[in-house]
């Protein structure tokens, strides 16, 4: 029997139901499992055999602290996905890396904090309508869709560049018919959903009025997802691959490897599949204890 922590955040405005559901499934497999707040100073991380990141949805605002925490936890226990994956995936610059190796990814303009002439560089792309967002962000919190030559876009871009790194991408109308998310646990497809924005919006998240429906992935979507996951810098216990259609082809929007909503509510049995993938990572260590 192993002791497993499922990490969440401390915001009382939304208590994520997924970690308790996963904990229950892990207990059914014979493990001790509890839901903990990742930045709780009272937690003894060395007392856990495994630490699983789930809904740590405040890390965007305290990234340096979060990365230090992940390294510290991994030095006394084991954290999944690994700190190498967390560090790589926490900054949307990884999208440019994936595009550079031939994956279908929307083109992007990456601007470092304090970059000179951000507006001129935006205009030079020649894009008509763009989405401007922080390079470290989630839930479309800091995103703006606007014409590239509009004062609104320029003001937003300059404000974001003053505060941190920024990613700008051309707006893809395909998102209006839905963004597809494929979920993989232990390297195997668990389920998929299509998230559709409310009429007149482009943001697919439920908090922005988006809706959800079960989706059957196409061979092309599975191919892009598999190629994207192969680019991760370490093994993946779980992954969410977000795709939209561009010119009839699935195109990567995000590769979510840290704290994605897993949409377990949309797929009966998915919490058990996630728990099984987590438990499977413990088997080599437990075998070593027995044979040692």
Image (tube, grey):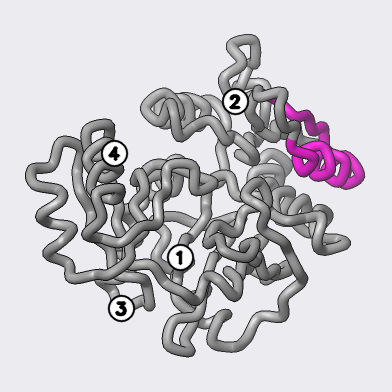
Instruction: Give the labeled residue for mark 1.
Output: 253
Q: Distance between the residues labelled 1 and 4?
A: 20 Å
Q: Residues within 10 Å of mark 3 (few under 14, many from 20)?
A: few
Of the pair 93 and 88, the residue shown nearer to us:
93
- Residue interval drawn in magenta: 16-36
Location of residue 138 in the rendering, given as x and y in whole percent from the top left corner: 50, 44
Instruction: Give the labeled residue for mark 4.
Output: 160
Give the quadrant of residue 164. Answer: top left
Q: Distance between the residues labelled 1 and 2?
A: 27 Å
Q: How far apart are marks 3 and 2 (CA)?
A: 36 Å
Residue that extends furthest to the right in the rendered view of this protein? 28
Instruction: Give the labeled residue for mark 3.
Output: 102
State which quarter of the image contains the C terminus: top right
Q: Are marks 1 and 4 in contact (CB under 8 Å)?
A: no
Instruction: Give the labeled residue for mark 2.
Output: 38
Disc 2, SS: loop
Q: On screen, 88 above or below 105?
A: above
Q: Which of marks 1 and 3 is nearer the N terminus?
A: 3
Residue that extends furthest to the front in the rendered view of this protein? 151
Q: Is residue 99 rendered magenta in the image?
A: no
Q: Which of marks 3 and 2 is nearer the N terminus?
A: 2
């Amino acid at each position: 029997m192993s002791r497993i922590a499922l990490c969440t955040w401390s915001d009382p405005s939304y208590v994520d139901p997924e970690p308790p559901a996963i904990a229950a499934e892990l207990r059914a497999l014979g493990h001790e499992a509890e839901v903990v707040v990742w930045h709780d100073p009272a937690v003894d991380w060395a007392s856990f055999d495994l630490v699983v990141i789930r809904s740590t949805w405040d890390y965007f605002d305290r990234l340096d602290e979060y990365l230090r925490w992940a390294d510290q936890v991994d030095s006394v226990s084991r954290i999944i996905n690994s700190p190498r994956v967390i560090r790589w995936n926490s900054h949307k610059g990884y999208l440019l890396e994936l595009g550079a190796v031939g994956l279908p990814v929307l083109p992007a303009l990456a601007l470092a904090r304090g970059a000179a002439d951000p507006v001129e560089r935006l205009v030079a792309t020649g894009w008509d309508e763009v989405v401007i967002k922080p390079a470290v962000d989630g839930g479309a919190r800091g995103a703006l869709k606007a014409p590239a030559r509009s004062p609104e876009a320029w003001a937003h871009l300059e404000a974001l560049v003053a505060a941190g790194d920024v990613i700008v991408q051309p707006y893809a109308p395909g998102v209006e018919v839905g963004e597809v998310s494929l979920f993989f646990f232990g390297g195997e497809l668990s389920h998929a959903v299509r998230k559709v924005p409310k009429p007149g919006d482009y943001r697919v998240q439920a908090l922005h009025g988006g809706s959800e429906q079960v989706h059957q992935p196409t061979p092309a979507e599975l191919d892009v997802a598999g190629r994207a996951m192969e680019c991760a810098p370490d093994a993946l216990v779980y992954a969410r691959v977000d795709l939209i259609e561009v010119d009839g082809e699935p195109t990567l929007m995000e590769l979510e490897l840290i704290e994605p909503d897993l949409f377990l509510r949309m797929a009966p049995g998915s919490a058990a599949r996630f728990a099984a993938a987590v438990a499977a990572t413990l088997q080599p260590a437990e075998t070593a204890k027995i044979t040692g």
